[in-house]
Each structure stands twice: as C-alpha cells, then as structure tokens.
Image (cartoon, helix red, strand yellow):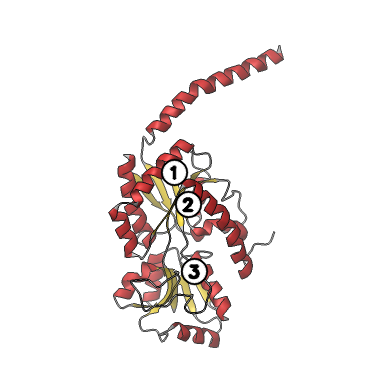
Amino acid sequence: MFRRSLLGAAALASLTMLVASPAQAQAWRTFPEKPIKLIIAFPAGGPTDITMRALADNAARALGYPVIIENRPGAGGTLPAQALQSAPADGYTLAQIPLGVFRVGYTTKLDWDPLKDITYVINLTGYAFGIVVPADSPFKTWQDFVDYAKANPGKLTYGSTGTLTSPHLTTELIAQEAGMQLQHVPYKGSADLMLAVTSGQLMAAADSTGFAPFVEAGRLRVLNTWGAKRLAKFPDAPTLKELGYDIVQNSPFGLGAPRGTPPEVVKRLHDAFKKAMEETSYLAALAKYDMLPDYKSSADYAKFAQETVAREKAVIDKLGLARSQ
C-alpha cells in the first residue's frame, strides 16, 4: 500500500512537472514583465554610477521595462554579489560584479561561493586607473612620490575606493615592488575620495579616471596610469610598465544574476545588455572616463571568473592578506 502511494505521488509529481513546463516556458518567453533592479557597488556620482545608468537606460529600451539602479557601496565592492544570494532566481535582480568579488573568499569567511552561487550574464568594461596628487603637491613626478615615501615610511597617505579593491591592492603591489610603506585610507567611492584628495585630507589617491574632471580643472596631477599604454586624455602620465613595474590593471567587471536563473532569462538579459553596450550614449559615457567596452559572452564571462579566482589568490598570497583558516 505504502509502495503504491509512493508510486502514485511520483507519477503525480511527474505530471505536475509536465504541466508546469509549458507555463514556465511561456513565462520565459515573455520575460520581463516588470522592472529589473541592477545593484552596483559604488555610490552615485562616480564613473561606475554614471556609465551604468547610461547602460541601464539603453537596456530598458531593449527589454521594454525600466532597469532601476540601486547603489550599494562598501565591503570592497562585494555587497551587490552578496545581495544575489537572497534574491529570487528570476532575472529581476542583477548585480555588478567587480574584481573584488573574486578575491573576497581568500580574505573573508563566506557562506557563498563566487563561482557556484552567481550566474554570469555578460562582461561589460573595465576601468582606467592611476595615482593622482593635489595640483599644489610637492610631488611633481612619480619619482618624487617614491623618494618621499622611502624617506618617510608610513607617513604618505593615499586613499582608494575601498579596502581590498583593485586600486588598494594594486597600489600595495606597487609599494611592495618599490620598497615603500604607505598609509591607506579607504573610501566608499570615487566621489568621496576625490573630495578628500582635492581638499588636502589626503596626499594622494589611487582611483579610476573619476579623477579626470579634477585634473582637467587644474586641481589634481596624474603621476602614473595602469593600462597597457598611456591614456589619450593624459599622454604625459607614464604607465606602470614604463616606470619599471610589471603591472597592468583594468579591473574588468560585468553583470551577474542569482544561481539557478533560467538559461532563457540569462540569454534575454545578455542580448539586451549587449545591444545596450553598442549604443552611442554608453560609449560616450565610457569615453568620458577613458573606459573601453570589454564584451564577454555568458560562457566566456563564467570562464573568466574561474581564471580570475585562481589569479587573485596569487595576489592575496603575495601581499600576505589571506585570512587564517
């Protein structure tokens, strides 16, 4: 009797799945049917916020529903990825995935896995980084900066957009190679960081080119940039490679969804955001900060995530920042 009940329950479950599948398929075909929330890792007013809002506007036209930006700064840019862990896997919650997401597991105990618990949708772009100082700083060149730091260990203050972000860790790698000891001050985003360095609260800042308007206004000076070649907007600023450091950093980022998001929904999102990336308004927003499109498909982005998690472990180990087991 018990066995017959189990068989009956199993048959009923199978029938339910067969009945439900067409309905689910129909839902996927009509996705979306309401606004989509896109959580980004940095505050309003900075380069990430401005470029992502341009992208969201374009994607909204492709999707037929608004894409609403929610700023959630802090924790080294990992809060949006963390938010995915409690969001329904229905495509209506997306998150920016900064590079810090791939290293956080080595420095902080997590109850989620950046590789297993995020569905990678599309890679978008990367940042153009550099180190800037106030225009009236005595550091006229990068060598001036290094000479002072070596003569005054721990006294040269610099800010970044957060602990364990790419600007922070890359600056620490530079300092390690140059034999400098710097004092790091974390901020939640570019807007706050730029206010601090232009007002003289900091001696320097490591940031994306959110600093560009301040340099152009004569309030900041660029000492170096971190790309493979010099930035067109700041042709006099040498790259780290030119200064003798074997470092190139552009910190690619893209969009993720909760684990288990249906492939059909992922494809719809991918296609809409890929189209949004190609719009003139988005390309113009990127150009304002010397950022370039860096498209990766869902599959390529997932592969990039795996490779980057392995690569970031080497960086964390080199800096001695790995958490104790």
Q: Secondary structure at mark 2?
A: helix
> Callout 2, which amino acid?
Pro
Can you give x and y, in whole percent of width and height, for residue 127 in the image?
42, 63
Can you give x and y, in whole percent of width and height, for residue 200 in the image?
39, 78
Disc 3 crowd rating (10 Å Cα; few below 14, some 14-19, many 20+) is: some
Q: Residue 248 got which mark?
A: 3
Left or right of residue 40, residue 115 in this image:
right
Quarter of the image holding residue 316? bottom right
Residue, x 64% and y 63% (percent of image)? 322
Can you give x and y, in whole percent of width and height, for residue 219 in the image?
33, 77
For the residues marked 1 and 2, what is the alpha-carbon distance in whole angstroms?
A: 10 Å
Residue annotated with mark 2: 80
Residue annotated with mark 1: 93
For the residues marked 3 and 1, what is the alpha-carbon distance in whole angstroms?
A: 32 Å
Outermost residue on the top side: it is 1
Using the image, determine if residue 279 lies above or below residue 157: above
Q: Residue 62 got which mark?
A: none
Q: Secondary structure at mark 3?
A: loop
Left or right of residue 14, residue 208 in this image:
left
> Callout 1, which amino acid?
Thr
Q: Quadrant of the N terminus?
A: top right
> Callout 3, which amino acid?
Val
Between disc 3 and disc 2, the foreground one is 3
